[in-house]
Image (tube, helix red, strand yellow):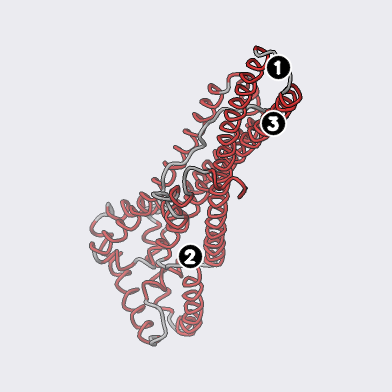
Amino acid sequence: MKLFGWLKKKNKEDDLEGKKTIGEYIDDMEKPALVVPVPFRVSSREEVEGFVANALSQIDIANKAVEEAKDEYEAVTNSLKDIQIITDIPPEAKAELAVAAEKIQELSAERESYQKSPNKIPEEQYLKIESYGENIREMMKKLDDDEKYAVVIKNDMQAIEGEKTEIRYEIEETQDKLDLYKRLMGWVLGMLGAVVVFTVANIAALKNAYDVWIYGALACIGVILVMIFAKQQEERRELHFQERKLNRAISLLNKAKVRYVNIQNSIDYQHMKYGVESAYELNHIWGIYLEMKRERELYRNSSKELHDAETELISILSDYQLIDPRIWVHRSAALLDDREMVEVRHDLNTRRQKLRKNMEYNRQVAENTGKSIQNFARMNKSFAEDIMNMVKVKRL
């Protein structure tokens, strides 16, 4: 590879001017840009199968993300419906509800005062963790797994991007060699012309003194031409091989981009939902919560009045067919203060909007990837029937 370095017309360092670093590339990937496979011309059924399999896998990833978001979206929507039901409760019933909620607030404040210490989490965070119940263990594991998976995908993208850069350099090296062989071919053909002219001149002069030299030169030139032609064919095959490798790397990278956008969206949503920055922080808060809960259990055993107030609140709300009346034990402040209720509604709307945006993004990925398969079939008409059959088989 270094053998032809002196014949190159440009410096490789100049080629890097204006190109993104891998770090900048990864930063761009963290923005939820729409990523779909880009169709290209192929020359074998193997390449067709690779493109179709990658595209269908990408559609499956997007559809799965939509289905996972739907359950959470429904839960958030149900909470908003409950808020509307509470808003429409008649004034006399609201007064009764306010009495129960105020009693819960007072007794909870007493309990908080009893348990308060510098090492405890805020009451708001405690109530949020408590509302998740035993599900928090599964939630912590999912967040931890997602964060680790995001790191793996980011590393994969860095590795693939590095591979792409290396392949592009190899393609440029191969193209440089082809340019060199083209120039060498021109020089050798020029030499051949010179020998032919000399031969004609020698024959015209009826001299045979240079016959051996002429035949030898022609033989050497013929051998050189054959060698150059063979090298050209070899480098063309290498160029085609490298281009196929590049297309494969691009397909893998596109697939990784979609996975990364989805997992990062999921992580961002979980961070917002739990009010943390990482799974480690959530686990730490969970440990403090368990300690606080043990202390509060001692107090709760002697706090039948608080239990009765909570039961009364749940009973009142159940009469109005709330989907989840129990959660309002932990949102009793919102039943007493309209501003608190506005905050709860705003938080739920923000979560629902983020979920809706994520579902729409993945629906677009699935739709545009389907169109990309169609464009791929149009671009490679000789394989169109194979492409459609592959799609039908894999969709069954």
The residue to which callout 3 is attached is: 224
The residue to which callout 1 is attached is: 207
Say what amino acid the circle numbered 3 marks: Ile
Distance, label 2 to label 1, CA atoms, is 105 Å
State the image coordinates of residue 336 (x, y, percent, origin top left).
26, 66
Say which quarter of the image contains residue 94. bottom left
Would you say 191 lies left or right of 125 here? right
Say what amino acid the circle numbered 1 marks: Lys
Q: Quadrant of the C terminus?
A: top right
Would you say 132 lies left or right of 353 here? right
The residue to which callout 2 is attached is: 132
State the image coordinates of residue 25 (x, y, percent, origin top left).
44, 52
Q: Is residue 39 above or below residue 123?
A: above
State the image coordinates of residue 279 (x, y, percent, origin top left).
50, 68
Q: Viewer-proximal residue, 271 or 44?
A: 44
- Given contact means CB atoms under 8 Å apart, are the residues at marks 2 and 3 in contact? no
Question: Dot 1 surroundings within 10 Å: few (below 14), some, or many (20 or more)?
Answer: few
